[in-house]
Image (cartoon, rainbow, N blue to C red):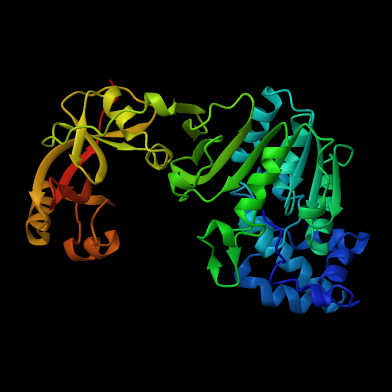
């Protein structure tokens, strides 16, 4: 999650008896726990009224902290198991940077399969990865330098009954000796005061430091942004891109004797489908061909891993344009790595023609997808004003270099 101070919890306030650390500690008291239970289901729209009522019987700072925690727990239910989210603790920044539970569980399972029994989780954040690792039976040293973040991680381990397997240590990760551990996991911060950080050397700690830490460990994994250029991947590492329900969540660099240097892999959750290729087996880009009866939209992890050619081979297809990751084929074949659509119409980009066609077909349920187009889906929807009972999918894209619109629908299962 990154070794960087939560902007909502400045270190200068740590010693302040009324600061964020003290406010969080108050949530762990009997009064704080009872208050958290009371505000669990408060509607955000009615939060002000609830705060006014609760401040009659509780300190204002504690009420504010409880309501803020309730909001975070409600949001966290979509990222973590709902039962876990209701018991866990979060900071705003910690929640944003934490690993989705399904992704953390996937990575923990891989470490377990590699025989890892102890691991140093550097830049542990609120402990999302440490929790998954501990549930896999791995003993975890969880390290972060922010006092509040460590307090939250420690509370989460306690709340989920994993304190015996998770040791939380407040320290600078660059000063921690990891030689006694089977593996190292590093999750540098990729957000700063101005939002996302795209330069890997601006991560905290920098990617170069994380790579050196990984090289010293028997096995290691580094969590990085999925947009990392392939040329930035160290030669001895294998790279994995992970998506969850179609959304690309992260990339991971794996190090160790059991890693094939230069290998790339796309992992699709929740199915666990994996598409992998070693460098020597990487296929050349598929041929560009006219749009056929079917269009395949590769999963984002497949695209990021540069494995679209593997999908094209699977479905006996080619690209609609040399710069667009849509695969076309006259055959409908099952594939775990792409969503298939049957194409009924192909038009040059023309909003009026599209509007007329949709009206003629009675299309009121319109899904708009884009790749290689500057037009925003919602903008197009406003212009065509779909009406009717039928459904269709429109792809705003390029075909052989020219702006185009492809109209179709999800292909029926074979």
Q: Nearer the viewer, residue 330 or 23?
A: 330
Residue at image position (34%, 33%) is 338
Asked if residue 72 is positioned above or below residue 176 in the image, the reply reads below
The residue positioned 47% from the left and 45% from the top of the image is 248
Q: Tell whether 174 sits left or right of 204.
A: right
Residue 55 visible in image: no
In this picture, residue 7 sits left or right of residue 25? left
Residue 162 percent location from the top left of the image:
84, 39
Nearest to the observer: residue 402 or residue 408: 402
The image quarter in which residue 211 lies? top right
Looking at the image, which residue is at 42% across and 29% down?
279
Tally of marks = 0
Residue 32 in sight here: yes
Q: Residue 230 appears in which quarter of the rendering?
A: top left
Q: Position of residue 5 (x, y in %)?
A: 72, 66
Which residue is located at x 83 percent, y 57 percent? 171
> Which quadrant would the C terminus be assigned to in this image?
top left
Q: Nearer the viewer, residue 70 or 407?
A: 407
Query: Please, is residue 249 above or below residue 64 in the view?
Result: above
Q: Position of residue 118 (x, y in %)?
A: 80, 33
Instruction: Where is residue 304? Give x, y as percent.
Output: 41, 42
């Amino acid at each position: 999650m990154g070794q960087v101070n939560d902007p909502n919890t400045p270190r200068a306030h740590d010693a302040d008896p009324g600061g964020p650390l003290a406010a969080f500690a108050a949530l762990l008291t009997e009064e704080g726990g009872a208050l958290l239970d009371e505000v669990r289901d408060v509607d955000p729209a009615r939060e002000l009224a609830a705060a006014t009522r609760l401040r009659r019987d509780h300190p204002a700072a504690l009420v504010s902290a409880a309501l803020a925690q309730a909001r975070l727990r409600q949001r966290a239910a979509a990222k973590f198991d709902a039962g876990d989210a209701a018991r866990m603790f979060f900071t705003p920044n910690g929640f944003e940077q934490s690993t989705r539970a399904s992704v953390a569980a996937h990575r923990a399972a891989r470490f377990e399969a590699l025989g890892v029994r102890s691991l140093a989780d550097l830049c542990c954040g609120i402990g999302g990865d440490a929790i998954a690792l501990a549930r896999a039976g791995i003993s975890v040293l969880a390290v972060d330098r922010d006092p509040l973040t460590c307090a939250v991680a420690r509370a989460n381990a306690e709340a989920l009954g994993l304190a015996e397997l998770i040791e939380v240590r407040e320290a600078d990760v660059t000063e921690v000796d990891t030689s006694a551990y089977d593996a190292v996991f590093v999750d540098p911060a990729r957000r700063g005061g101005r939002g996302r950080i795209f330069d890997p050397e601006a991560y905290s700690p920098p990617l170069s430091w994380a790579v050196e830490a990984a090289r010293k460990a028997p096995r290691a994994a580094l969590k990085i942004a999925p947009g990392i250029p392939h040329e930035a991947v160290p030669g001895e590492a294998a790279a994995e891109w992970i998506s969850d329900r179609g959304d690309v969540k992260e990339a991971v660099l794996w190090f160790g004797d059991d890693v094939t240097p230069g290998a790339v892999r796309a992992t699709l959750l929740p199915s666990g489908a994996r598409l992998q290729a070693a460098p020597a087996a990487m296929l050349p880009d598929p041929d560009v061909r006219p749009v056929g009866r079917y269009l395949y939209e590769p999963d984002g992890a497949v695209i990021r891993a540069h494995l679209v050619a593997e999908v094209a081979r699977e479905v006996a297809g080619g690209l609609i344009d040399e710069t667009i990751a849509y695969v076309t084929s006259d055959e409908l074949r099952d594939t775990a790595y792409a969503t298939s659509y049957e194409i009924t119409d192909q038009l040059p980009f023309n909003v009026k023609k599209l509007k007329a066609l949709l009206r003629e077909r009675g299309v009121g349920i319109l899904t708009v997808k884009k790749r290689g187009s500057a037009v925003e889906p919602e903008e197009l929807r406003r212009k065509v004003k779909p009406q009717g009972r039928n459904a269709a999918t429109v792809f705003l894209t390029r075909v052989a270099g020219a702006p185009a619109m492809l109209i179709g629908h999800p292909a029926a299962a074979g």
